Image: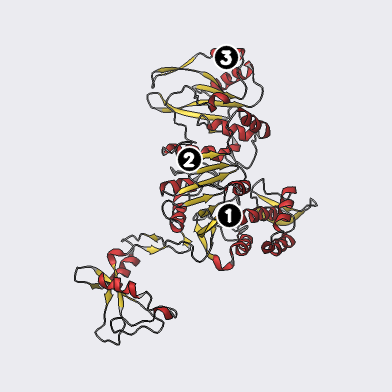
């Protein structure tokens, strides 16, 4: 296993393979994972047994790569080699049978085992899921992390719900997700978070009025608080300034007591038989401590500036709360299903080091684009591992997975993927793309409206016909320009065909640009870029 000192890094690949190849034991401080659990919320699938018969029970589809197949069977056998997991996984197999849900749990079990290995003893893990698999995942996490290290089932109210206009529903609406919070050990870091309280809130106003009734010599409002321990603490049972300790001992050490006395935080009763109390100052009130019901963070609306169109995108505020709870600045956050990169963006803003892993080039491209918008540049501020680095590896990707090749090639010029497949990276491309693989946009005209540049990607044989087809697509879509990315070198007839389109003249930017441009993957890997107006290429 490679030993690696982590700086900010994105990995393309299967997270199980990446974890085993690059991650040493106990090297990350916090793990957040939002694995595919509801990526096709528009329809259900049936449990399908190995025999091909359909069960009457239904679950929501997780993703196309969670199926009981030879790989799931092989992983199931591997898990049974671990005596700590054998009984648990056999029980689930006997209970569920060989179906998509079991395949999902098998694939999650082997990954959660690796994630537990790479987590520091002071670290914690937050697994985001919904009701379809939360109970099963609890069983798995209890076995891997230990029941004693379960901290919370956090309930995130992600939407207000919607009414049934015909009142035909036979169940309550679902408006929450679950985040399963486990610590690696009892020493795991936990920074309490607070929700600022609006002073217009009448409950808060009444609380302050009824509790902070005292004023010290400096004019600071305070309330008095008990200093006794709620449970027996023999090591903190000591006299202080002649005052007897409470029955269970003090809540703090003698050193802390002396510190608070010097800071004017202690209240000494006149009667020596009384109890010392603590001053809690109003001006130090941070707000309401966050509980396990998170109903103050809204999901991303259709009008939100944060919205990217990625099907499972979570709000940055949600990840910030998790990251601030479990880490301090400079510590390492890992997201092994990093998707559109919300964990990465939140970690970057909070000055944490970060690691993201995803199995699609679409995700890596999207994160690259988001980071570029905040002037965080690949190769300068972070590294990407697993992408094609030369023409040979690009050719291998084009041959093995044309759609992944297409997404990767588009990222080389910051183009936005188009088509249904770009919105759900777990499925293949569906429907005609009308000759458009990606778009680049830029501001044009007196009104500075967005103008479009069509991008096509070809991983196989190309000829002059492909260039003329691109010209036709540019005209039919009323686009300004077209770019053809090819794996092969363009032929002379292709170059001549591209010149037939002549130039696009930008009145806003005051230049002429070749209307059709052909760039090879080799050129792009060497750093060459298309000649374009100032672009607005946000994925």
Residue at 67 percent across and 63 percent down: it is 84
Does residue 96 show up?
A: yes
Identify the residue position indicated by label 1 in the image: 115
Front position among marks 3 and 1 = 1
Q: CA distance from mark 1 to mark 2?
A: 22 Å
Residue 129 occupies quadrant = bottom right
Q: Give the secondary structure at mark 3.
A: helix
- Residue in front for this viewpoint, 536 or 265: 265
Mark 1 Cα within 10 Å, few/some/many (few <14, many 20+)? many
Does residue 298 show up?
A: no
Q: Earlier in the sequence, mark 3 or mark 1?
A: 1
Q: Earlier in the sequence, mark 1 or mark 2?
A: 1
In percent of width and height, residue 227 lies at 35, 77
Residue at 32 percent across and 69 percent down: it is 207
Residue 457 occupies quadrant = top right
The type of colouring in the image is: secondary structure
Identify the residue position indicated by label 2 in the image: 382
- Residue in front for this viewpoint, 49 or 193: 193
Mark 3 Cα within 10 Å, few/some/many (few <14, many 20+)? some
Identify the residue position indicated by label 3 in the image: 495
């Amino acid at each position: 296993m490679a030993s690696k000192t982590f700086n900010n890094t994105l990995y393309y690949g299967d997270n199980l393979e990446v974890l085993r190849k690059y991650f040493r034991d106990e090297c990350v401080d916090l793990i957040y994972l939002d694995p595919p659990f509801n990526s096709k919320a528009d329809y259900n699938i049936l449990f399908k047994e190995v025999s091909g018969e359909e069960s009457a029970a239904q679950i929501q589809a997780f993703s196309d790569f969670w199926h009981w197949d030879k790989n799931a069977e092989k992983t199931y056998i591997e898990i049974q080699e671990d005596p700590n997991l054998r009984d648990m996984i056999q029980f689930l197999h006997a209970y569920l049978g060989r179906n998509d849900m079991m395949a999902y749990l098998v694939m999650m079990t082997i990954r959660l085992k690796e994630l537990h290995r790479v987590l520091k003893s002071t670290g914690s893990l937050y697994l985001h899921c919904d009701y379809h698999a939360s109970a099963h995942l609890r069983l798995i996490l209890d076995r891997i992390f230990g029941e004693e290290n379960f901290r919370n089932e956090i309930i995130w109210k992600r939407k207000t719900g919607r009414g049934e206009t015909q009142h035909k529903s036979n169940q309550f609406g679902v408006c929450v997700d679950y985040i399963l919070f486990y610590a690696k050990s009892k020493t795991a870091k936990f920074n309490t978070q607070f929700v600022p309280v609006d002073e217009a809130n009448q409950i808060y106003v009444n609380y302050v009025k009824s509790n902070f009734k005292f004023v010290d010599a400096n004019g600071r409002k305070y309330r008095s608080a008990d200093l006794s321990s709620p449970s027996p603490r023999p090591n903190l049972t000591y006299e202080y300034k002649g005052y007897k300790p409470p029955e269970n001992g003090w809540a703090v050490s003698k050193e802390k007591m002396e510190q608070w006395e010097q800071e004017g935080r202690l209240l000494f009763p006149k009667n020596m038989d009384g109890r010392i109390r603590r001053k809690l100052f109003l001006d130090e009130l941070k707000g309401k401590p966050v509980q396990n019901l998170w109903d103050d963070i809204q999901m991303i609306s259709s009008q939100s500036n944060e919205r990217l169109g990625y099907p499972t995108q979570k709000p940055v505020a949600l990840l910030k709360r998790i990251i601030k709870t479990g880490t301090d600045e400079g510590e390492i956050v890992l997201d092994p299903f990093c998707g559109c990169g919300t964990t990465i963006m939140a970690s970057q803003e909070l000055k944490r080091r970060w690691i993201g892993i995803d199995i699609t080039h679409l995700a890596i491209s999207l994160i690259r684009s988001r980071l570029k918008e905040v002037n965080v540049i690949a190769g300068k501020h972070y590294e990407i591992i697993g992408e094609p680095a030369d023409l040979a590896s690009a050719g291998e990707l084009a041959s093995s997975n044309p759609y992944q090749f297409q997404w990767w090639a588009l990222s080389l010029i910051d183009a936005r993927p188009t088509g249904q497949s770009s919105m759900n990276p777990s499925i293949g491309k569906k429907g005609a793309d009308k000759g458009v693989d990606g778009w680049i946009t830029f501001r044009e005209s007196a009104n500075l409206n967005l103008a479009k540049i069509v991008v096509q990607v070809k991983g196989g044989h190309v000829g002059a016909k492909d260039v003329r087809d691109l010209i036709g697509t540019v005209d039919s879509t009323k686009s300004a320009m077209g770019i053809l990315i090819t794996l092969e070198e363009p032929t002379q007839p292709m170059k001549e065909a591209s010149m037939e389109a002549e130039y696009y003249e930008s009145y806003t930017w005051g230049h002429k640009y070749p209307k059709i441009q052909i760039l090879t993957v080799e050129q792009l890997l060497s750093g060459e870029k298309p000649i374009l107006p100032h672009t607005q290429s946000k994925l």
